[in-house]
Amino acid sequence: MPYKNAMEQTYDSGNFPALLEQGLKLADYAGFDRRAAESKARGKLRGRGLVTFLEWTSGNVFTERVTVDVSGDGFIEIYTATQGMGQGIATSYAQLVVDVFDVRSNGCASCRATPIAAPASAVQARVRCSPRDRRCSSHRARRSTGARARRRSARSGRRRPRIRRCGIPHRRHRSHRRMFELAARQEQHVIHVDTTSTVGGPSWPNGCHVCEVEVDPATGATQVASYMSLNDVGRVVNPMIVRGQLDGGAVQGIGQALCEEIVYDQESGSC
């Protein structure tokens, strides 16, 4: 690694053999013959399937714009062109904003966020204004806060806190209340941050899935006896939502393979 494939795409990282070895161990691949014999003794057929896969993210669109407004009345709003498709993007943004701005949250802990692509990177890593943009209200907040900090430092003899570009002090001294107070002092009562973030390339999550099924040869009825998966998803923001996506995707694939259907009652429409 890095490795360039035949389609000129570069894998930046990944240990695919190790993932396969762990998957085989988790599924007890070597014990399949014993389980197949047990199934046969009960009049069933047992089969197994194994797949390793590599997923490509970003669609080769690496730049995303995000704007953030911090208002003096205690609200943080973010604006982006990305759309939610059931992947938890709304709660993802909420979690990232809470983490980046160190804001206390009273929201539902079980609804926090999933990893998202470039927009998340923009909020998490680029919530700032350019020092060249003298019109940025957060730059004015930084100047005024820094001046007050220097005056306090001169009087008390203490070392002043380090100020970030958007007017938010270092984490040790940072306060969400101070951030909203700074916003309230601005001309429009808001700190506005407009940022564009670009990542270096796609990421390559990958996995190994192993499935065993039992089939009744007389009826064709199929039962999933076991399903094991290992997934290298990279940095996890919210384990619960990531686990839900992995398990949900596997169950959806099983349903498609078994030709599942939804049967509706013609009179009531209930399923």
Image: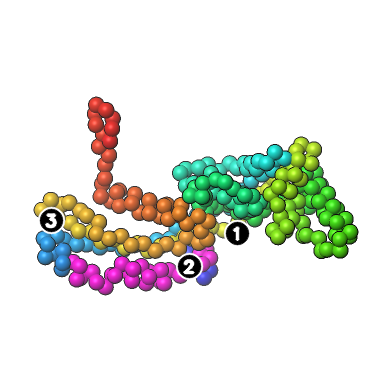
Q: Which residue type carries mark 1?
A: Gly
Q: Is residue 196 above or below residue 232?
A: above
- Residue 131 percent location from the top left of the image: 78, 52
Residue 21, can we see it? yes
Q: What is the magenta range? A: 8-36
Q: Can you identify the residue that label 1 sits on?
A: 200
Q: Is residue 65 above or below residue 172?
A: above
For marks 3 and 1, give the one nearer the viewer.
3
Q: Can you identify the residue that label 2 sits on?
A: 14
Q: Main secondary structure of the magenta part?
A: helix
- Given residues 69 and 29, the one toward you in this image is 69
Q: CA distance from mark 1 to mark 2?
A: 17 Å
The question of residue 29 being in magenta is answered with: yes
Q: Can you identify the residue that label 3 sits on?
A: 217
Q: For the C terminus, which image quadrant?
A: top left
Q: Which residue type carries mark 3?
A: Pro
The residue at 12%/51% (across/down) is: 219
Mark with earlier residue (2, 3): 2
Element class at badge 2: loop
Element class at badge 1: loop
User: Mark 2 and 3 residues: CB-CB less than 8 Å, in contact?
Assistant: no
